[in-house]
Structure formats: C-alpha cells, structure tokens
C-alpha cells in the first residue's frame, strides 16, 4: 500500500512541478517582453517568475541526479561528483558564512588598492582570483565545520537533542 501512495504522491509532485514550471516560464516571457529594463528593476519583475521556477527546477534536477547516481558504483566520475555534492551539502551553511567573510575582505582589499574596475570585469586575472578565493572559503568552511563538530559537540558546550 505504501508504494501505491508513493507513486500517487510522486505523480502529484510531478503535476505541481510541471504547473509551476509552465506558470513561471509564461510569467518570465511576459515580463521580459512587456516591460522595460527600468520597470523590471524598479518593481522586481525579473525575479518573481523565478520564485515559481525554483521548485520545479530543483525537483527535476534532483530527479535527474538521483537517476544518475544510481549508476555511481559503475562510473568513477559520477561517484566523485556525488561525493563532491555531498560535501557541498554537508558544509553549505559554513560555505555561505565563509564566502561572506572572504569576499568582503576581497572587496576591502581591492578598495584599498583602488582597483574596483579590475574586480568588476571578468578576465583571466580575476578568474584566477575567484578560484583562489573559492578554495580559501572552502578550506575555511571545512575548518569551521571541524571546530563545531569536535569542540562544541564533544565538550557538551552545545547540547544535541
């Protein structure tokens, strides 16, 4: 009985995701065709359709990844990407926090050097800078997670329920 219920719920989720995908796509097309850039920025008309699109994109992307990861034992690239996505999922909050720290320090540093135009234009030099900053923020996120897990939880500073 549970498998029938799961199929029914999955069918309902597919219908909801498809309806949101169609509604968001239509609203995005309408807002892009019938508004000027100034109106879209002033009223935020570019962002509202993505509220509808985000669930269906996430739903279909996770279904695709679930299908691909079912073959993860056979393909080492899929197995690596599965572990990489698991790392990003396990450390997502710490990555968010470390990105804000690292990139705000980067803005401050570039502001001191008066090279704001360097940061705004994507070229080979600052692409390398972005890769380095991303690596630093990943390392900082990993350290933050390690400190939280080892220091706070094991010393009972924070109680886990």
Image (tube, grey):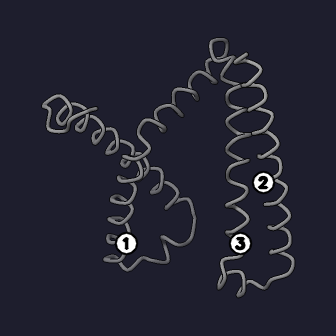
Location of residue 45 in the rendering, given as x and y in whole percent from the top left corner: 71, 76
Instruction: State the CA–CA distance, disc 2 to disc 1.
Output: 42 Å
Q: Characterize the local packing of mark 1: few (<14), some (14-19) or many (20 or more) Cα atoms within 10 angstroms.
A: some
Looking at the rendered structure, the secondary structure element under dot 2 is helix
At 28% from the left and 32% from the top, the residue drawn is: 161
Q: Characterize the local packing of mark 3: few (<14), some (14-19) or many (20 or more) Cα atoms within 10 angstroms.
A: some
Q: Nearer the viewer, mark 1 or mark 3?
A: 3
Q: Nearer the viewer, mark 2 or mark 1?
A: 2
Instruction: State the CA–CA distance, disc 2 to disc 3.
Output: 16 Å
Image quadrant where residue 1 sits: top right
Location of residue 85 in the rendering, given as x and y in whole percent from the top left corner: 54, 34
Query: Who comes first in sequence, dot 1 or dot 3?
Result: 3
- On screen, residue 150 above or below 36: above
At 45% from the left and 57% from the top, the residue drawn is: 129
Q: Which residue is mark 2?
A: 20
Query: Who comes first in sequence, dot 2 or dot 3?
Result: 2
Q: Which residue is mark 3?
A: 46
Location of residue 22 in the rendering, given as x and y in whole percent from the top left corner: 85, 55
Looking at the rendered structure, the secondary structure element under dot 3 is loop
Residue occupying the far top of the picture: 74
Q: Nearer the viewer, residue 75 or 19?
A: 19
Image quadrant where residue 140 sits: top left
Q: Which residue is mark 1?
A: 110
At 36% from the left and 48% from the top, the residue drawn is: 136
């Amino acid at each position: 009985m549970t498998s029938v219920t799961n199929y029914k719920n999955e069918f309902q989720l597919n219908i909801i995701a498809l309806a949101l995908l169609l509604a968001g796509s239509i609203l995005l097309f309408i807002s892009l065709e019938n508004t000027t850039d100034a109106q879209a920025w002033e009223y935020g008309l570019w962002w509202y359709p993505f509220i509808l699109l985000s669930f269906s994109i996430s739903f279909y992307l996770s279904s695709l990844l679930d299908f691909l990861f079912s073959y993860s034992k056979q393909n080492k690239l899929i197995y690596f990407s599965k572990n990489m996505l698991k790392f990003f999922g396990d450390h997502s909050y710490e990555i968010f926090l470390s990105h804000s720290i690292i990139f705000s320090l980067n803005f401050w540093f570039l502001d001191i050097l008066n090279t704001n135009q360097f940061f705004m234009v994507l070229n080979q030099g600052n692409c390398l800078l972005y890769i380095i900053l991303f690596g630093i923020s990943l390392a900082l996120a990993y350290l933050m997670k390690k400190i939280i897990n080892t220091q706070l939880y094991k010393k009972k500073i924070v109680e886990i329920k």
